[in-house]
Image (cartoon, rainbow, N blue to C red):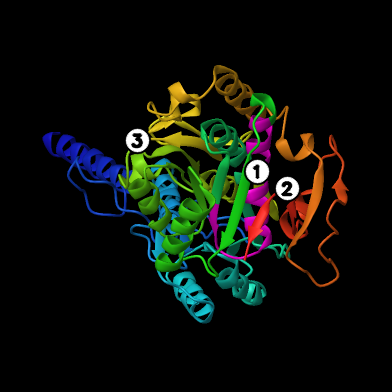
């Protein structure tokens, strides 16, 4: 009798152990603090679905450190990676047109899903390989070409909106009635941005009953420090300019403004707050470009398994929330870490009539709401100067190309706006 009880007990233990063994994981036990081992036979995502993780690779045409253009793109990549734990940011610097494709192929082989050329001249070669890598998304900045493919996206921010607000401030600050622009060379991007600034200056002049001259002189390229310095000095010494800005990339115009004791208006980044290049005693205001807002639109679409829009031309109506909860517009006026009317230099603010400060605040609010735009509001009348394009000659001086109240198309603004606005002085 006792034997049979032992036999029954042994049998029960054997059955229990077999049952537990059948339910137990095949992998060895691990300590509670370790993650369980992952199976090796997980099925790949169905064809056509976007991956759950992305790598954003930016090819910078210049060095990053100490530049506002590539510096802003680099900051954008870092902010995207901070916001999305499943998005990695990698980059290459000083990428010319001959290197953009080899670097892109190397980056894709290392896992990049998105490859950006942060200037058109070195971003356009990516279009040639887009068909070879249908699972990758290629992005290029727009200078004047607006060609696209399903996986070749074109982007640019409506910087002219923030430049318009800068123009209001510059127009109020000038006491001599002369404002200077150190510029690179005639191209649609430069012409469009300068137009936004000029319209702001002219609106300030009308409101305040001033006569203001805006002088533009070209250096010949984006980064020519000595030539930019010489032009800035010429504008001050020969044309009595007391407010100066630039459409170039070196710090030379700012240096001249500091040395001459005149006001400077910055571009592309908050040069005081971001780099500490100067102080608000010289920098009246800057505009800041948040490329991350455009990158965010692309990434959101890809993570949702959708195709991004082929041309993204976003302005102050668009924004993104950063990892720390800060909401940032695509472009905005900014100075020493402050935005909006608070970005106006404390030293400059007492010199600006209240009606201009109020107008800056009003127009900024309206543009954020998408209710007003300087390029829709104003007529475009040709100065007779600009950039001759194939099939698009410079309109004769005095020609009204666009009437007030008519919204110009995105394609026209990005690829056909080839003339200076009437009243500007283009110096030889």
401 horizontally vs 176: left or right: right
Which mark is drawn over residue 281?
A: 3
Label 1 element class: helix
Query: Residue sitting at 53 percent across and 38 percent down?
Result: 176
Query: Residue sitting at 81 percent across and 47 percent down?
Result: 381
Does residue 426 lie above or below 129 as drawn?
above
Which mark is drawn over residue 25?
A: none
Circles 1 and 2: CB atoms closer than 8 Å: yes
The mark closer to the camera, 3 or 2, is 2
Query: Which one is in front, 274 or 401?
Result: 401
Residue 199 magenta-highlighted: yes
Part of the protein shown in magenta:
181-205
110 horizontally vs 15: left or right: right
Regarding residue 32, the answer to whether it shows in the image is: yes
Circles 3 and 2: CB atoms closer than 8 Å: no
Q: Which residue is mark 2?
A: 423
Does residue 70 lie above or below 333 as drawn?
below
**Residue 345 location (% of width, % of height):** 41, 30
């Amino acid at each position: 009798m006792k034997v049979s009880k032992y036999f029954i007990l042994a049998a029960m233990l054997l059955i229990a152990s077999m049952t537990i063994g059948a339910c137990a994981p095949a992998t060895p036990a691990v300590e509670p603090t370790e993650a369980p081992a992952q199976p090796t036979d997980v099925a790949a995502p169905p064809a056509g679905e976007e991956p759950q993780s992305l790598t954003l690779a930016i090819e910078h045409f210049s060095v990053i450190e100490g530049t506002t253009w590539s510096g802003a793109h680099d900051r954008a990549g870092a902010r995207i990676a901070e916001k999305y734990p499943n998005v990695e940011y990698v980059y290459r610097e000083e990428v010319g047109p001959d290197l953009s494709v080899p670097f892109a192929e190397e980056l894709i082989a290392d896992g990049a899903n998105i490859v950006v050329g942060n200037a058109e001249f070195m971003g356009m070669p990516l279009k040639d390989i887009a068909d070879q890598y249908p699972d990758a998304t290629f992005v290029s900045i727009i200078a004047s070409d607006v060609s696209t493919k399903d996986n070749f996206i074109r982007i640019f921010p409506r910087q002219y909106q923030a430049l318009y607000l800068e123009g209001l401030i510059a127009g109020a600050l000038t006491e001599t009635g002369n404002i200077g622009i150190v510029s690179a060379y005639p191209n649609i991007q430069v012409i469009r941005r300068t137009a936004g600034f000029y319209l702001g200056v002219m609106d300030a002049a009308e409101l305040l009953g001033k006569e203001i001259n805006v002088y533009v002189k070209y250096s010949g390229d984006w980064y020519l420090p000595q030539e930019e310095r010489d032009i800035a000095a010429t504008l001050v010494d020969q044309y009595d300019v007391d407010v100066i800005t630039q459409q170039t990339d070196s710090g030379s115009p700012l240096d001249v403004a500091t040395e001459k004791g005149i006001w400077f208006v910055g571009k592309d980044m908050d040069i005081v707050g971001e780099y500490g290049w100067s102080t608000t005693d010289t920098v009246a205001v800057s505009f800041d470009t948040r490329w991350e807002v455009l990158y965010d639109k692309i990434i959101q679409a890809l993570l949702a398994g959708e195709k991004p829009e082929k041309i993204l031309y976003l302005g102050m109506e668009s924004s993104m929330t950063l990892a720390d909860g800060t909401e940032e517009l695509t472009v905005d006026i900014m100075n020493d870490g402050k935005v909006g009317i608070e970005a106006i230099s404390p030293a400059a603010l007492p010199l600006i009539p209240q009606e201009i400060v109020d107008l800056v605040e009003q127009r900024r609010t309206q543009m954020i709401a998408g209710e007003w735009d300087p390029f829709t509001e104003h007529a475009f009348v040709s100065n007779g100067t600009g950039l001759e394009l194939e099939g698009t000659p410079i309109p004769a001086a005095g020609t009204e190309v666009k009437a007030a109240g008519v919204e110009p198309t995105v394609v026209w603004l990005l690829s056909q706006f080839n003339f200076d606005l009437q009243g500007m002085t283009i110096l030889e």
